[in-house]
Amino acid sequence: MKNKFARIFLVRHGEVVNKKKIIYGYLPLKLSPKGEREAKKAGLFLKDKKIVAILSSPQKRAEQTAKIVGRIISKGKIRIQTERDLRESGWGEFLKGLTWEQARKKYPKETLLYSRQPSKVKKGESLQKMAARMAKVIQKEIKKYPGQNLVFVSHRDPILAALLKISKRNFNDLHKVKPICPTGSICEVWSVGKKLINKTYLSS
């Protein structure tokens, strides 16, 4: 019996309204007009990809993005499923409400570690734990929808942590690959049976 093949699309939510430029963690910030346009663009890209399920982080910005994508690809017929394991980084929640300048002053050791060796950051949540929960929910849905294409709406660091794990890359490469995951971006993973294969280019 051949392994079933499916395409997994990891969508980062659109830009949010964030005039104070704070780290927003789990705060319920809504999409900006630009963020809504980014979500629409993602939806148009995914429209002909035969998507059968859309799962979203519980954060407001992700749910808004998922709903816009869902309207475009299925006219709202696909029900958005909220999945806690797609949530924002616990590290971002730890620094919630601070600007990066304030965070560096308040937590100099932790923020320096994040910039130089992010794999060693344990405050809030490690990259290893982020990658594990992302892989868990992806595998669960692959089992539920074998051989069918799926969309997961999440956040930058959880998406990148998952891609690094799938690619067997060092988590310290987080900052090298950040440019591939701006707001509204789509990364692709292939599922061949239970095996996940990253199809998004990661800079070396």
Image (cartoon, grey):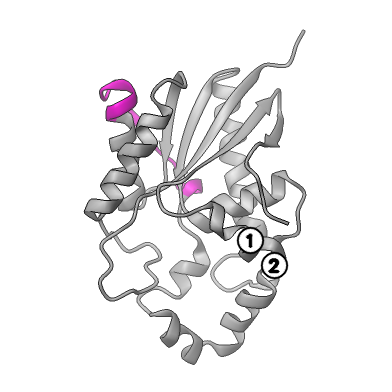
- Residue 105 visible? The answer is yes
Precedes in sequence: disc 1 or disc 2: 2
Question: Measured along the vertical axis of the image, is residue 180 above or below residue 77?
Answer: below
Which residue is rendered at x = 40% and y = 71% of the image? 23
Horizontally, residue 1 falls left or right of residue 12, namely right
Q: Quadrant of residue 141?
A: top right
The answer to whether the residues at label 1 and label 2 have Cβ atoms under 8 Å apart is: yes
> Is residue 114 covered in magenta?
no
Can you name the residue that lies furthest to the bottom here? 105
Secondary structure beneath disc 1? Answer: helix
The residue that disc 2 covers is 119
Horizontally, residue 25 falls left or right of residue 142, namely left
Where are the magenta residues, as a range? 71-86
Which residue is rendered at x = 28% and y = 67% of the image? 18
Question: Measured along the vertical axis of the image, is residue 198 above or below residue 24?
Answer: above
The residue that disc 1 covers is 127
